[in-house]
Amino acid sequence: MAEQLFFKSEDKLSRYTELRPQLEALLGVETDVVANMANFCAALKDAFGWFWIGFYIVRQDELVLGPFQGPIACTRIAYAKGVCGSAWAEQKSMLVPNVSDFPGHIACSALSQSELVVPIFKDQKVWGVLDIDSTKIADFDEIDQVEIEKLITWFAGLL
Ligand code: SME
């Protein structure tokens, strides 16, 4: 496929709909997981312009930074710590409208104001998480959570 994404909608849900087949075309022809994580982040950043998006991967008892788009970030997060570690421990998505209200939030950047973290399952276990940060308060809603969960469920099938 052409190495450029096209979006004509401003509406968020329509953008997710436009993104999906393009992601499938881009990632579906590649078997390397790192390459696919990298392009997954780049495509989402291109579509939505968020401040930071990236993967953290489970390595023994902590999460280790994987491919991402955005400023430099914390490399290791302990189990059950921060929003990412909590999503891992609780095995569910964490939608955080204001990170200041989340006890134990790990501030990799002081600019981050809201966050969405979605766990990635492989063989019924958490393999990693996708973390998305915005500089705006309450930038993510249930539409984002549902649509990102759908994308991540599909992505997990490529692992
Ligand atoms: N805020 C996250 C840490 C990762 S950075 O946002 C990239 C957390 O509390 O787990």
Image (cartoon, grey):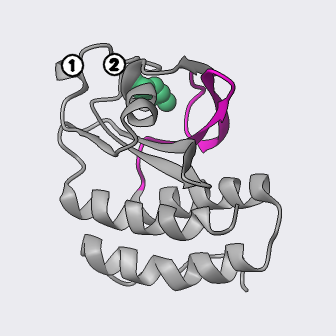
The quadrant of the picture occupied by the N terminus is bottom right
Q: Secondary structure at mark 2?
A: loop
Give residue 156's position: percent from left, percent from top: 59, 62
Is 72 a magenta residue?
A: yes
Q: Check mark 2 vs ligand 1: CB closer than 8 Å? yes or no.
A: yes
Name the residue rendered at 17%, 42% in the picture: 138
Specify the farthest residue to the front: 124
Left or right of 64 on screen, residue 120: left
Residue depicted at x 59% and y 75%: 23
Q: Is residue 68 left or right of residue 112?
A: right
- CA gap, disc 1 to disc 2? 7 Å
Mark 1, residue position: 100
Pointer 1 and pointer 2: residues touching (CB < 8 Å)? yes
Other-residue count near label 1 (Cα within 10 Å), few / some / many at <14 / 14–19 / ≥20: some
Q: Quadrant of residue 66?
A: top right
Residue hosting label 2:
105
Residue 75 % position (x, y):
64, 22
Q: Nearer the viewer, residue 149 or 53?
A: 149
Count of all numbered marks drawn on residues in the image: 2
Q: Which residues are magenta?
A: 49-75
Looking at the image, can residue 109 be seen? yes
Magenta stretch contains residue 57: yes
**Quadrant of the displayed image that contains ligand 1:** top left
Give the quarter of the image for residue 31. bottom right
| Foreground disc of the pair 1, 2 | 2
The image shows residue 115, relative to residue 99, as above or below, that is: below
